[in-house]
Image (cartoon, rainbow, N blue to C red):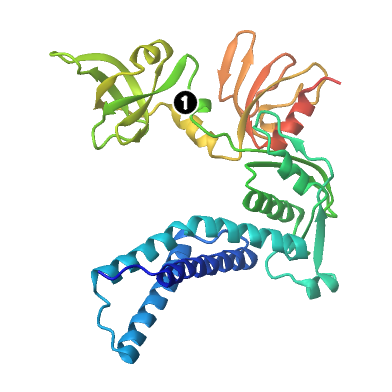
Amino acid sequence: MAPVTTAAVAQAVGLTVVAALVVVVLAAGFRWYFRQRVPFGVALLVDVSVVTLYLNTRVALGEAVAGRTDALSVAEVGSNLAVFAAAIVLVPAALRAGDRIGIQLLAATGTRELEGEVGQLVKAVGRAVAVELPEEVADIEGYDPVTPETKRELAGKTFIFPRRLTVDELEDRLVARLKDDYEVGYVDVELDAAGTVSYLALGRRTAGIGPTLPPGTAAVAVRADPPYTAAAGDLVQVWRADGEQPRQVTTAELRAVKDDTVTLSLDEFDARSIAGGDYRLLTLPYEPGADRQFASLLRNADETMTVVSVGAGSDLEGRTVGDVDGTVAAVRTGDGVEAIPKGSRVLAAGETLYVVARPDVVRRLDSAATAP
């Protein structure tokens, strides 16, 4: 077997670097033109194609010019596979670097703030509207705050959009830009007819399963042997099989499966008792409860659940449920809870409303429910 020379190593390293640079350029150009991240599969395909094109060209020239016939030797195949592996490993880093370069380059030149194909010429003839964000970016109550770096980056920033947009369309475009380009989960913004932003608040989307756990329950990860058909949301029996006679320990809800590690949601006391053991799981026929389905849907939606109390003399007192800007899920009174009230029901002071609405609606609802 021929020894690996320094020149061959340098050639392999140079090839992987060139392939990574091509991915960086691709990611930056894709972000600039389409205003979104290039798909990983596309970046991987381009990276591998660069390596393949070079290796095929080298083999073809070697056979035609130098008469080489060792393209399928063990050393040559191993060297090529090593180059492919190194190039593939660099794809995620090159993809992230190119995407960030595209964002920073467009932000520095001002091109990043243009919507779609609106360019400097269009802006100069008055067919674009500038939307300037306020210097103070607030947090949405009840949501995880965005990072201080994101707030500083957005404070006072100006975005350019086509002029032929209604206020609602302009707000939707602005919200979409903030979510797509800055990884913001929730946006509460107020725009007037001139496109002036009078209020901006941001929040991050909640991560993890904690917010979806009902009161009195907990989630615990255990080593288990789940059925191959088990999926998140299934009801399972937890059996301990460390003795001669298997015995049922508890019943839980399956939340996640990773190899032989299973996350279960169950009663807080039972969660403590099963931690650290090995189990077998038996799936039971089960339809997820309405509370579980509602929590899952609400977690991925722009709306959230809020609780407001109707103050005496507030704008909500004497109004009907149908007048509330949002979905009233329940009304709590001194006599109990009334679920899904009729739209004609009149609201009284001291009552508590459970409302599903967007963050901007929640803020206005809090103001309307506050007594003067």
Q: Is residue 111 left or right of residue 301?
A: right
Can I make out residue 162 in this image?
A: no
Q: Residues within 10 Å of mark 1 (few under 14, many from 20)?
A: few
Which residue appears at 53% of the width and 55% of the height?
93
Badge 1 amino acid: Asp
Can I make out residue 159 in this image?
A: yes
In the rendered image, residue 140, in percent from the top left (x then y), is placed at: 71, 34
Q: Of helix, strand and loop, which one carries label 1? A: helix
Which residue appears at 63% of the width and 57% of the height?
100
Q: Is residue 181 left or right of residue 8?
A: right
Question: Which corner quadrant holds the N terminus?
Answer: bottom left
Place residue 277 in its image quadrant: top left
In the rendered image, residue 224, in percent from the top left (x then y), is placed at: 28, 26
Which residue appears at 36% of the width and 87% of the height?
61
Question: Which corner quadrant holds the C terminus?
Answer: top right
* Residue most extreme to the top: 335
In the rendered image, residue 228, in percent from the top left (x then y), is placed at: 24, 37
Number of marks present in the image shown: 1
Q: Is residue 184 left or right of residue 245?
A: right
Disc 1 target residue: 291
Compare residues 324 and 3 and report the one nearer the observer. 3
In the rendered image, residue 115, in percent from the top left (x then y), is placed at: 71, 63
* Residue most extreme to the bottom: 65
Compare residues 212 and 316 and report the one nearer the observer. 212
Compare residues 311 and 60 and report the one nearer the observer. 60
Place residue 239 in its image quadrant: top left
Place residue 145 in its image quadrant: top right
Q: Is residue 263 left or right of residue 13?
A: left
